[in-house]
Image (spheres, rainbow, N blue to C red):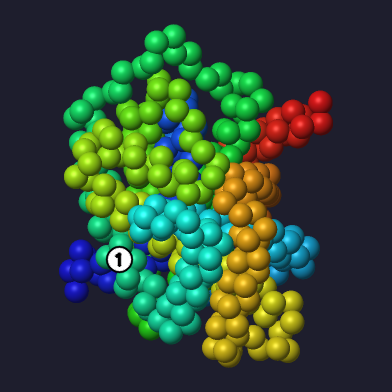
């Protein structure tokens, strides 16, 4: 088998990671960063992607070498590690999915032109449809469908970004004053942006679980091949974040337009900012691309949080043999759908509160989870030659310090 064919055959966990990441952090936060603060936001986006890279890479490395999930590694380090991660997952259960489905429902309402339909009702339909797809299709369907979705999305965004750049920067309004970054609102936005850029650090275990699932039906690749496949997905997410930032900056920066926290209004603003700068002919193209972005993110995150929850329960209660029975996966998918539908109904269309809570939690725990992942890959379970090199270890410590600094800064601002 040629190297190219083998690489395409190995595509899976890294691709799912890309699909999951290209959601709220990109469509919502990257666009908003460009629209409100301009090109200066290139720096925190790049830094977040660089400093968080080792945290995610370790999930792939640990699983490939040990044939264990990253969560099993937490248990091997001590039950405190596992209980801490369980607490993070519990918070994610009530925030991340609800936030993603709210944004997606808003985009669907905009796309279908049904403004009088309650957003909670549309979200219920999405929960039901995606749950059915996951229960029936499981991992194989997820991987195959997202190969197509991510490819189309990447091409669509390349074309859109090119057209936006070609048309040029929108003319700033008279007396325009850029928003300050280093005041309370700016720092809080930075924390939210970097908290979910490219995605939450706890998602490192998601890639680990997808790898285990893929190897049940495909030949397990070498460590180098696994890392190569993941790096493609990671690089893709980083590039697309800059695409969304560019679109926000070129079309909205300087216009004093404030992106709404209401999911339906925000969806309309996003689609309109594309079409007003490119042309009304692009409306359906842009609307479908934006919806596909969020739909694929909902599907991957729903699958991942289900798998993570089952893995944690299975490790804490091994007598249940929960990972040995497929029925538990179906139950997990449906329970998550029900819980998050209740959360969406309670928050209505105000996705801003959901996104803020989810990004804050993710940012605060990021350095801790990063350290936990480092402990896993530096343990005796991995041969010395397959542990991270010195440079990657140093980058990990730099990332932990970088994220810890902003977490401390946030608490200082809240308390004082």
322 left or right of 279? right
The foreground one among 13 and 175 is: 175
33 above or below 99? Answer: above
Q: Is residue 216 visible?
A: no
SS type, badge 1: helix
The picture places residue 159, in percent across and down from the top left corner, at: 21, 44
Q: Which percent across, then down, holds residue 169?
A: 29, 23
**Residue at the spot x=25%, y=57% of the render?**
152
- Residue closest to the far front: 116
Query: Which residue appears at 52% of the width and 20% of the height?
Result: 179
Residue 160 at x, y = what percent?
Answer: 24, 42
Q: Which image quarter: residue 12?
A: bottom left
For disc 1, the neighbor class at 10 Å (few under 14, some 14 to 19, many from 20) is some
Q: Residue furthest top?
A: 175
Is residue 199 in view? Answer: yes
Quadrant the C terminus occupies: top right
Q: Nearer the viewer, residue 397 or 52?
A: 52
Location of residue 291 with respect to 252 vertically, above or below = below
Q: Residue at x 20, y 69 (%)?
A: 5
In the rendered image, the vertical position of residue 416 relative to residue 364, given as above or below: above
Q: How many marks?
A: 1
- The reply, left or right, for residue 45 in relation to residue 315 is left
Residue at 48 percent across and 40 percent down: it is 29
Answer with left or right where residue 44 lies relative to residue 374: left
Residue bearing the label numbered 1: 147
Residue nearer the viewer, 69 or 111: 111
Quadrant in the picture for the N terminus: bottom left
């Amino acid at each position: 088998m040629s190297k190219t064919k083998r690489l395409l055959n190995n595509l899976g966990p890294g691709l799912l990671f890309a699909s999951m990441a290209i959601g709220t952090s990109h469509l919502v936060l990257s666009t908003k960063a460009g629209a409100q603060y301009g090109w200066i936001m290139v720096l925190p986006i790049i830094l977040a992607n660089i400093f968080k890279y080792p945290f995610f890479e370790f999930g792939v490395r640990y699983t490939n070498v040990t044939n264990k999930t990253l969560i099993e590694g937490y248990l091997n380090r001590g039950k405190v590690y596992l209980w801490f991660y369980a607490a993070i997952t519990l918070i994610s259960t009530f925030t991340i999915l609800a936030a993603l489905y709210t944004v997606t429902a808003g985009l669907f309402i905009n796309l279908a032109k049904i403004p009088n339909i309650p957003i909670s009702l549309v979200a219920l339909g999405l929960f039901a449809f995606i749950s059915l797809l996951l229960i029936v299709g499981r991992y194989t369907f997820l991987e195959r469908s997202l190969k197509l979705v991510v490819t189309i999305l990447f091409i669509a965004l390349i074309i859109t970004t090119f057209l936006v750049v070609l048309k040029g920067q929108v003319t700033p309004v008279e007396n325009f004053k850029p928003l300050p970054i280093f005041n309370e609102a700016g720092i809080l936005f930075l924390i939210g942006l970097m908290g979910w850029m490219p995605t939450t650090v706890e998602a490192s275990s998601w890639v680990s679980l997808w790898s285990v699932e893929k190897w049940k039906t495909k030949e397990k690749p070498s460590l180098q091949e696994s890392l190569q496949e993941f790096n493609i997905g990671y690089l893709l997410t980083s590039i697309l974040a800059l695409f969304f930032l560019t679109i926000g900056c070129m079309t909205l920066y300087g216009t004093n337009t404030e992106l709404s926290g209401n999911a339906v209004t925000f969806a309309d603003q996003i689609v309109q900012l594309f079409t007003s700068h490119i042309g009304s002919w692009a409306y359906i193209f842009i609307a479908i691309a934006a919806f596909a972005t969020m739909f694929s993110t909902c599907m991957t995150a729903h699958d991942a949080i289900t798998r993570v929850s089952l893995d944690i329960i299975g490790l804490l209660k091994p007598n249940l043999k929960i990972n040995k029975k497929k029925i538990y996966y179906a139950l997990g998918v449906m329970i998550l759908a029900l819980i998050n539908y209740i959360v969406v109904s309670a928050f209505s269309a105000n996705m801003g509160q959901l996104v803020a809570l989810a990004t804050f939690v993710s940012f605060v725990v990021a350095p801790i989870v990063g350290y936990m992942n480092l402990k896993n890959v530096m343990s005796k379970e991995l041969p010395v030659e397959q542990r991270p090199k010195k440079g990657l270890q140093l980058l990990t410590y730099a990332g932990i310090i970088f994220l810890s600094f902003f977490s401390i800064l946030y608490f200082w601002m809240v308390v004082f």
